[in-house]
Protein backbone atom coordinates (compact mmCIF):
# COMPACT_ATOMS: atom_id res chain seq x y z
CA UNK A 1 0.00 0.00 0.00
CA UNK A 2 1.52 3.32 -1.03
CA UNK A 3 1.06 6.47 0.99
CA UNK A 4 -0.22 9.80 -0.25
CA UNK A 5 2.54 12.08 -1.57
CA UNK A 6 2.27 15.87 -1.47
CA UNK A 7 4.33 18.60 -3.10
CA UNK A 8 5.37 21.36 -0.72
CA UNK A 9 7.33 24.58 -1.01
CA UNK A 10 8.67 26.23 2.11
CA UNK A 11 11.53 28.39 3.26
CA UNK A 12 13.96 26.69 5.64
CA UNK A 13 16.63 28.88 7.20
CA UNK A 14 16.25 31.37 4.37
CA UNK A 15 16.44 28.82 1.55
CA UNK A 16 13.45 27.91 -0.62
CA UNK A 17 12.81 24.18 -0.59
CA UNK A 18 10.55 22.28 -2.99
CA UNK A 19 9.99 18.62 -2.11
CA UNK A 20 7.53 15.80 -2.42
CA UNK A 21 6.78 14.28 0.97
CA UNK A 22 4.52 11.66 2.44
CA UNK A 23 1.41 13.31 3.83
CA UNK A 24 2.06 11.77 7.25
CA UNK A 25 5.74 12.78 7.58
CA UNK A 26 6.45 14.99 10.55
CA UNK A 27 8.32 18.25 10.18
CA UNK A 28 11.20 17.06 12.38
CA UNK A 29 11.60 13.90 10.30
CA UNK A 30 11.52 15.98 7.11
CA UNK A 31 14.17 18.34 8.45
CA UNK A 32 16.42 15.55 9.68
CA UNK A 33 15.93 12.85 7.05
CA UNK A 34 15.29 14.83 3.88
CA UNK A 35 17.26 18.03 4.51
CA UNK A 36 20.02 16.74 6.79
CA UNK A 37 19.29 19.35 9.47
CA UNK A 38 19.90 17.22 12.53
CA UNK A 39 19.97 19.93 15.20
CA UNK A 40 16.34 19.31 16.10
CA UNK A 41 16.09 15.99 17.86
CA UNK A 42 13.43 13.31 18.02
CA UNK A 43 12.72 12.53 21.65
CA UNK A 44 9.32 11.56 22.97
CA UNK A 45 7.43 11.97 19.65
CA UNK A 46 4.43 13.23 21.65
CA UNK A 47 5.28 16.92 22.02
CA UNK A 48 6.24 16.73 25.68
CA UNK A 49 10.04 16.91 25.73
CA UNK A 50 10.75 19.89 23.43
CA UNK A 51 13.76 18.28 21.75
CA UNK A 52 12.16 18.76 18.33
CA UNK A 53 11.44 22.49 18.79
CA UNK A 54 11.69 24.65 15.66
CA UNK A 55 10.34 28.06 14.70
CA UNK A 56 7.44 28.13 12.26
CA UNK A 57 6.45 31.55 10.92
CA UNK A 58 8.13 33.15 13.93
CA UNK A 59 6.56 30.94 16.61
CA UNK A 60 8.16 27.92 18.24
CA UNK A 61 6.38 24.62 17.59
CA UNK A 62 7.00 20.96 18.19
CA UNK A 63 8.37 19.43 15.03
CA UNK A 64 7.07 16.00 16.03
CA UNK A 65 3.48 17.28 16.19
CA UNK A 66 3.63 19.30 12.98
CA UNK A 67 3.33 17.62 9.61
CA UNK A 68 5.66 18.74 6.85
CA UNK A 69 2.65 19.30 4.56
CA UNK A 70 1.28 21.81 7.08
CA UNK A 71 4.34 23.93 6.38
CA UNK A 72 3.62 24.46 2.70
CA UNK A 73 4.25 28.17 2.09
CA UNK A 74 5.69 28.65 5.57
CA UNK A 75 8.98 29.90 6.96
CA UNK A 76 10.81 27.35 9.13
CA UNK A 77 13.86 28.16 11.21
CA UNK A 78 15.98 25.54 12.94
CA UNK A 79 18.82 25.82 15.41
CA UNK A 80 21.20 25.65 12.44
CA UNK A 81 19.54 28.76 10.98
CA UNK A 82 19.65 30.69 14.23
CA UNK A 83 23.28 29.68 14.70
CA UNK A 84 24.24 30.68 11.16
CA UNK A 85 22.71 34.14 11.55
CA UNK A 86 24.20 34.64 15.00
CA UNK A 87 20.78 35.34 16.46
CA UNK A 88 21.40 33.15 19.49
CA UNK A 89 25.21 33.35 19.68
CA UNK A 90 25.13 35.04 23.08
CA UNK A 91 22.80 32.33 24.41
CA UNK A 92 25.04 29.60 23.03
CA UNK A 93 28.07 31.18 24.70
CA UNK A 94 26.21 31.58 28.00
CA UNK A 95 25.08 27.94 27.91
CA UNK A 96 28.69 26.88 27.45
CA UNK A 97 30.15 29.30 29.99
CA UNK A 98 27.61 28.50 32.69
CA UNK A 99 27.65 24.72 32.11
CA UNK A 100 24.01 24.78 31.02
CA UNK A 101 24.52 21.83 28.72
CA UNK A 102 25.91 18.40 29.25
CA UNK A 103 24.83 15.78 26.75
CA UNK A 104 23.40 18.50 24.47
CA UNK A 105 20.27 16.60 23.45
CA UNK A 106 17.87 19.24 24.81
CA UNK A 107 20.07 22.23 24.00
CA UNK A 108 18.71 23.18 20.53
CA UNK A 109 15.13 23.21 21.82
CA UNK A 110 16.16 25.09 24.96
CA UNK A 111 17.98 27.72 22.89
CA UNK A 112 15.03 28.28 20.53
CA UNK A 113 12.62 28.49 23.46
CA UNK A 114 14.87 30.85 25.42
CA UNK A 115 15.36 33.04 22.35
CA UNK A 116 11.58 33.29 21.95
CA UNK A 117 11.24 34.39 25.57
CA UNK A 118 14.01 36.96 25.35
CA UNK A 119 12.54 38.41 22.17
CA UNK A 120 9.24 39.08 23.93
CA UNK A 121 10.27 39.97 27.51
CA UNK A 122 13.32 42.16 28.05
CA UNK A 123 14.44 40.86 31.47
CA UNK A 124 12.14 38.09 32.64
CA UNK A 125 12.20 36.93 36.24
CA UNK A 126 13.79 33.58 37.08
CA UNK A 127 10.27 32.27 37.65
CA UNK A 128 9.19 33.46 34.18
CA UNK A 129 12.27 31.82 32.63
CA UNK A 130 11.48 28.53 34.38
CA UNK A 131 7.85 28.72 33.30
CA UNK A 132 8.72 29.44 29.67
CA UNK A 133 11.26 26.61 29.54
CA UNK A 134 9.00 24.16 31.40
CA UNK A 135 8.00 22.36 28.20
CA UNK A 136 11.63 21.46 27.46
CA UNK A 137 13.01 18.55 29.41
CA UNK A 138 16.63 18.18 30.42
CA UNK A 139 17.82 15.05 32.15
CA UNK A 140 21.39 16.20 32.81
CA UNK A 141 21.70 19.73 34.18
CA UNK A 142 18.95 20.15 36.75
CA UNK A 143 17.87 23.41 35.04
CA UNK A 144 19.58 25.82 37.47
CA UNK A 145 22.49 26.50 35.10
CA UNK A 146 20.09 26.89 32.17
CA UNK A 147 18.06 29.50 34.05
CA UNK A 148 21.32 31.23 35.05
CA UNK A 149 22.43 31.37 31.41
CA UNK A 150 19.13 32.75 30.13
CA UNK A 151 18.97 35.31 32.94
CA UNK A 152 22.53 36.47 32.25
CA UNK A 153 21.81 36.96 28.55
CA UNK A 154 18.57 38.81 29.30
CA UNK A 155 20.42 41.21 31.59
CA UNK A 156 23.31 41.63 29.15
CA UNK A 157 20.94 42.38 26.26
CA UNK A 158 19.13 44.94 28.42
CA UNK A 159 22.46 46.54 29.30
CA UNK A 160 22.24 45.75 33.00
CA UNK A 161 25.20 43.36 33.11
CA UNK A 162 25.30 39.84 34.50
Image (cartoon, rainbow, N blue to C red):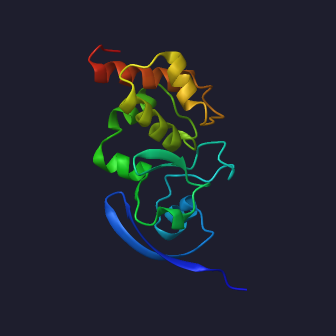
Lateral position of residue 153 relative to residue 30, left or right = left
Lateral position of residue 45 relative to residue 29, left or right = right
Q: Position of residue 99 (x, y in %)?
A: 50, 27
Q: How many marks?
A: 0
As drawn, 39 above or below 20: above
Q: Position of residue 79 (x, y in %)?
A: 43, 48
As drawn, 52 above or below 100: below
- Residue 67 found in image quarter: bottom right
Q: Residue at x 63, y 25 (%)?
A: 142
* Image quadrant occupied by the N terminus: bottom right
Q: Position of residue 29 (x, y in %)?
A: 57, 63
Q: Residue furthest left?
A: 159
Of 126 and 75, the residue lying toward us? 75
Q: Residue at x 45, y 45 (%)?
A: 59
Q: Residue furthest bottom?
A: 1
Q: Residue furthest right?
A: 1
As drawn, 160 above or below 138: above
Q: Residue at x 36, y 32 (%)?
A: 119
Q: Position of residue 24 (x, y in %)?
A: 63, 69
Lateral position of residue 52 relative to residue 120, left or right = right
As drawn, 42 above or below 106: below
Amino acid sequence: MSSLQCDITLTVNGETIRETVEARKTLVDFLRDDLGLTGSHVGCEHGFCGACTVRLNGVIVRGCLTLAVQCDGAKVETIEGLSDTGECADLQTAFETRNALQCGFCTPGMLLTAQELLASDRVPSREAIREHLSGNYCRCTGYHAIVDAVEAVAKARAGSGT
